[in-house]
Image (tube, rainbow, N blue to C red):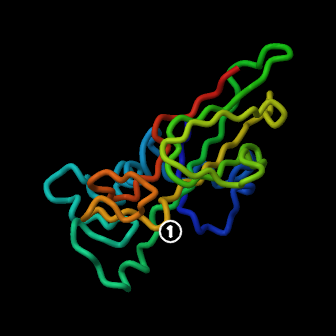
Amino acid sequence: MLSSIVQAGVPLSGKDLSDPNYLPFDSLQPAVVPGTVLTSLVANGDLADPYFGENLASILDASGRKGDKDQTEETTQQVGLSTYTYWFLRRFELSQPPPANGRLFLEFRGLNYTTQAYFNTKSLVAEAKVLQGEFLRRRFDVTESVRLTSPNALAVLVEPSSPPGNPATGLNNPNVQWPSSCQGGDQELGRGVTGRL
């Protein structure tokens, strides 16, 4: 359902990016969902396919490592968490109105790792402002904010955990279970997003 990505650090907030009237929406890069930021960057031709030849060794991960070799302090600072921190965006219209007295929900399956989410300029995570954890499943009632006859907009920020894992050892953060390699930061919308009535 989410169709565009924009790297975090743009001078716009989640509130701004989830405004259905945000004008440059259609000129953004496409996103692959379900998938990681790395999946979208590869699909858009920004990075080489990590499954071809030795390309994986040339992709820096969120901790500033390339393949299994540590990089310089300068490279680590240039890469850092922000390199793989992106907003996933989608503008859409309802295909049918909800039933009378019915509720409308946005259901996320597989949010990973730190997430902020906005729908039509309103934060879905009102109290904490962020969600943290691996492959989180969350359901949000958007009945009061949905637009029935005009476009709606969703903005979801995903970023790697801090500190990021070490792909050389498979573990750098004792609170997170890391796979043996985590190029691309492994932040993602892992199972898609759906609307439910």
Whole-percent x, y for residue 88 in the image: 56, 49
Image quarter hosting the C terminus = top right
In this view, the residue in front, 174 or 190, is 174
**At x 76% / y 19%, what residue is drawn?**
97
Query: Residue 165 vs residue 160: left or right?
Result: left
Residue 48 position (above or below residue 152): below
User: Which residue sits furthest left?
Assistant: 53
**At x 71% / y 52%, what residue is drawn?**
22
User: Which residue sits furthest front?
Assistant: 174
Specify the quadrant of the image occupied by residue 144: top right
Label 1: which secondary element: helix
Image quarter hosting the N terminus = top right
Specify the quadrant of the image occupied by residue 149: top right
Query: Residue 185 vs residue 132: left or right?
Result: left
User: Which residue sits furthest top?
Assistant: 100
Residue 165 position (above or below residue 141): below
Total residue callouts: 1
**At x 66% / y 33%, what residue is drawn?**
139
Dot 1 crowding, Cα within 10 Å, few <14, some 14–19, many 20+: some
The amino acid marked with disc number 1 is: Ser
Whole-percent x, y for residue 69 in the image: 22, 73
Whole-percent x, y for residue 77 in the image: 43, 80
Query: Residue 59 vs residue 129: left or right?
Result: left
Residue 98 position (above or below residue 2): above
Q: Pointer 1: what residue? A: 82
Whole-percent x, y for residue 102 in the image: 80, 18
